[in-house]
Amino acid sequence: MRIAQVAPLTEAVPPKLYGGTERVVHWLTEELVALGHDVTLFASGDSQTSAKLSPTWPKALRLDGSVRDPNALHMVMLESVRQKCDDEEFDILHFHLDYYPFSLFHRQPTPFLTTLHGRLDLPEHQPVFSIFKDVPIISISDAQRRPVPNANWVRTVLHGLPEQLLMPQPVTPSYLAVLGRIAPEKGVDRAINIAMRCGIPLKIAAKVDRADQDYFDQLISPLIRGNPLVEYIGEIGDHEKPEFLSGALGLLLPIAWPEPFGLVMIESMACGTPVIAYNRGSVPEVIDDGVTGFVVEDELSAVAAVSRLRDLSRAGVRERFEQRFTARRMALDYLAAYRRLIERAEPRIRLVSSAE
């Protein structure tokens, strides 16, 4: 199958550090190539891939201070994809750019679909999905669909990561962990409160976006400064995650928003580390309560769950990850969706009787 994967230009594929969508695109692309498919990846020029790379800009936009209007370059990339449809005749186009491709690509014949990686509960999303009600889309959790239930959902494909990417390490767990991004919706202040109420050290490995710098400076930094129980490590890459997560009693995710998926949950599970997360968005679809962690409602129940972490089998957490959240399973789910759309797009032969 000839497949185009179209990634955001914000981060390289895979990203150097943080970057959930680009990381998923990388894992999916590598699995599709490993399965024998002809894949072209549209991404930044500093991306690394086994597929054919079609770069729009030399460097990931988050790391390129010269770019002030990222939308302009994404428009260039979309036009590049459209032009190559004429030359290379892809069997399927797979976008990871939210609703940006809808208007252009529903006017051309090559089958396409879009995986929506973000939240859909904002008021301005409603007219988008009302106008483009026939555009085929993939959800990354069933919970993500709730605000727009009548959109043209093809299927839900839960994220997966390479089976051997993050492996449990032989270390003794001794702290609680936060991983990912420091922002109000991620609830890092609540994670600090939970750890302090339990009297257990907390290590925070997370980046701070420019938009969230005030939140960090005004709320998080004072909670960390001079606090012997809290250590802020900063942003870490995949090669540092196995030791960081394996050393944690559990990962804390006290989110305050409808998380569409939450990649850190399966990263933690891959290392055999259970997760304590608030019952928001995709959390109950990802965590098997009482097996890979605990789904809780508030700070009080999170504190109670911490005392139960040692009752869980870390080998069992890893086993459930292997059953549900590998990149190979994700790729096979997407291939099934591709085939369905291609079959729908194939012209139907009309039988004509001799009398006509």
Image (tube, helix red, strand yellow):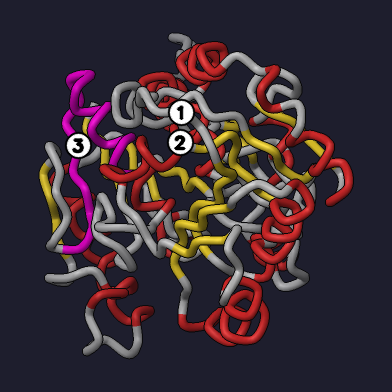
Which quadrant of the rendered structure holds the N terminus?
top left
The residue that mark 1 highlights is 172
Disc 1 to disc 2, how far (Cα)?
Answer: 6 Å
Task: Answer few, some or many: residues within 10 Å of disc 3's Cα (few below 14, many 20 plus, some between 14 and 19).
Answer: many
Is residue 231 positioned above or below 301 on the image? Answer: below
Q: What residue appears at the point 32 percent right and 81 percent down from the top-left corner?
A: 72
Inspect this view and state whether residue 347 appears.
no
Q: Is residue 244 left or right of residue 50?
A: right
Q: Amino acid at mark 3?
A: Val
Q: Earlier in the sequence, mark 1 or mark 3?
A: 3
Labels 2, 3: front one: 2
The magenta stretch is 25-44
Task: Answer few, some or many: residues within 10 Å of disc 1's Cα (few below 14, many 20 plus, some between 14 and 19).
Answer: few
Q: Amino acid at mark 1?
A: Thr
Mark 1 near mark 2, Cβ–Cβ under 8 Å?
yes
Labels 1, 2: front one: 1
Q: Earlier in the sequence, mark 1 or mark 2?
A: 1
The residue that mark 3 highlights is 39
Q: Amino acid at mark 2?
A: Gly
Is residue 94 positioned above or below 216 on the image? Answer: above
Disc 2 to disc 3, how far (Cα)?
Answer: 37 Å
Horizontal and vertical percent for residue 62?
A: 31, 74
In depth, the one of 78 and 192 nearer the eye is 192
Task: Answer few, some or many: residues within 10 Å of disc 2's Cα (few below 14, many 20 plus, some between 14 and 19).
Answer: many
Q: Earlier in the sequence, mark 2 or mark 3?
A: 3
Secondary structure at numbered mark 2: loop
Secondary structure at numbered mark 1: loop
Horizontal and vertical percent for residue 118?
A: 58, 56
Inspect this view and state whether residue 326 appears.
yes
Q: Which mark is residue 247?
A: 2
Q: What residue appears at the point 42 percent right and 52 percent down from the top-left corner?
A: 21
